[in-house]
Structures are given as structure tokens and as C-alpha cells.
Amino acid sequence: MLGLLLSGCALIKPASPDISLIEPISHPVRFLLTFDDGPSTSNSQNPTASILHDLEHNPIQPGIKALFFVQTRGATLRSPGRELLPREHADGHLIGFHTATSGHKNHRFLSHEDFIASLENGISDIQKVTGSAPKLVRPPFWNYDARTFDAYQMHGMHVLLTDLSANDGKIWGFNGSPRRRINLYNQLSTMRPKMVVGQIPVVDNVIPVVVTFHDTNPYTARHLHEYLQILLEVAAELNIPVSPQPFYQDKTALERAALARTIKSESEVVVLPGIWSWIWGSNPDTGKAKLAAFN
């Protein structure tokens, strides 16, 4: 039984789901895969390298293109991380900005000088690899305020958060995900009513559903094929139509979809999966203490 639960193969459905599985959805979904925090600098079975291989070679849809929100300074300057960022671009994936600080630091808690330096360094680092400045940013810890949001916009970057999270951000100690299937089921179930009433934009005749993983997590890397299958299975269980091409295969279409799903205003109300809405709450200034307590 323990092995079955750890494998994520058992789906425990909510006893009384609050959604109707009968109401039709006008367009099929396409899953927009994103990866945070890389590239990995691990010299042993590097998870970023493994994920790049499996996106290209998998039994579900070979040649998947994803969006990588990268850290360009600190540990990622070391090999093999240094070589993996150009590989992500060469493989046809989209590169977005995460941070260019010495570590995974919340931009809201940086001084103005350090924050702007992070933006300018990261943009320069990515531009040297891809030939163009990044258009997309995912703030560390999903957190931003009026100051940081305006600075992202002034630097030509738009904030993309997520619809679904694999809850795999933890990369030390036990980094498995024994509830991965039920987590994704529950998160996607909350999206279904929004799809029914047309609250999620349609781009290229599909509804882009943003999914977040962390390519620094070796568990994610070892189980990526299974995660792809789980996404398709929970969509079927929720009677959510999926495009014949369930994942993005063209970087230009991927970018169009991602830009359509970005936050348009700092005051826009967003609901994050997992613990993050609780951490930041209605008053993000309380989030620093909560985050410290959580860590």
C-alpha cells in the first residue's frame, strides 16, 4: 500500500466535488509546461539535462517545448549549469527570467539597487544566449508588489504565474510527491468552472493551462513521463477536453499563449495553488514572516 501511494498511482477523488462534470467547455486545453530555478548544476544525473531529454523523447508527445524560468547568477554559473542554458535555447525551448541574484531571493525584499541590478544582469545574461531579451518573468516565491511589478514592466517583462503546480519546489531531503495525482486533480478541478464560463483566454483555438515544475528536482526528472500521463488522465476524469496536441510543440505558439496568461495589473487578484496564497494572503507584507516560519 505504501508503495502504491508513493508511486502516485492511486487517485483519491473528493467525496463531494463542487464541480459539474457535465457542463461543456468550448475549447480543448493544451498544457503549457514551465520549469523554475534551473539550470541544475548537479554533476550526477543532472535533472535539467534529463528533463530536456525527456521533453524531446517521450511516448506521449515527442518534441514538447517548454518555458524555463532561469537563474543566471550564483550557482548556475558553474558547469554543467552554464552549458545547459544554451542547450535549452538550442533545443527550441523558451527562456524566461526568474532571478539573477546570488541565491533564490525574494525580489520584494531586495534593496532598489540590488533589485535593478538583478533585472539588468539577468536580461543581459539571457540576451547573450538567445539573442533577445526575455519577455516573461516569474518572480521568486510567486511574490511581487507595485514596485517590482512596475520594474518588470519597464524592463519589457510580463509576470506569468501558474494554474497547476507539481508542488516539487523542495529539492533537499525528501523531494518526492506521494500526492502528485490528487494534487493535480484538485487544482485542475478548480479551473473547470472558469473554463466553462470563459474566464480563461483562448489562444490559437485552445485554452492554455500553465503547469509548473522545478527542473532542479531529481524526483521530477525521474518521473516526468508519469507527470505527463497524469495530466492527461486527470483531464479525462474531469471531462475536460484536451487538444490532439496536448502539449506545446512550437516556441512561437508557446510564447503567444504564455503572454496571454500573464498578469495585466499589479492589483489583479490571483489565486495561487498550494500554500502560496496563504503565505502572501491579502496583505503580502505578512508573507515574509510566514515564509520564514515555513522554512
Image (spheres, rainbow, N blue to C red):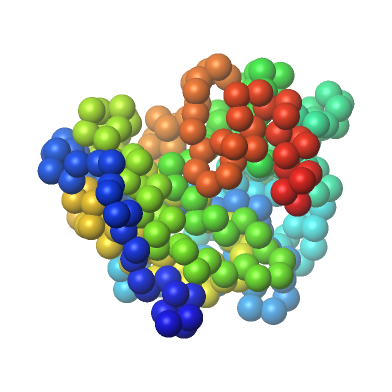
At a point 83% along the width and 24% down the height, the residue shown is 112
Q: Residue 209: name its quadrant.
A: top left
At a point 40% along the width and 30% down the height, the residue shown is 260
Estimate the x, y position of residue 163 in percent, counting from the top left.
43, 42
Q: Nearer the viewer, residue 132 or 168?
A: 168
Q: Residue 120: name its quadrant.
A: top right
Q: Is residue 85 visible?
A: no
Residue 191 placement, left or right of 292: left
Residue 213 placement, left or right of 143: left
Using the image, determine if residue 217 lies above or below residue 287: below
Residue 9 placement, left or right of 237: right
Estimate the x, y position of residue 31 in percent, counting from the top left.
35, 50
Q: Nearer the viewer, residue 125 or 183?
A: 183
Q: How many marks?
A: 0
Q: Is residue 101 visible?
A: yes
Quarter of the picture containing the N terminus is bottom left
At a point 50% along the width and 56% down the height, the residue shown is 166
Estimate the x, y position of residue 64 in percent, counting from the top left.
39, 59
Using the image, determine if residue 237 lies above or below residue 160: below
Estimate the x, y position of residue 75 in percent, counting from the top left.
80, 58
At a point 39% along the width and 59% down the height, the residue shown is 182
Residue 245 placement, left or right of 93: left
Q: Residue 197: name its quadrant.
A: top left
Q: Nearer the viewer, residue 72 or 210?
A: 210
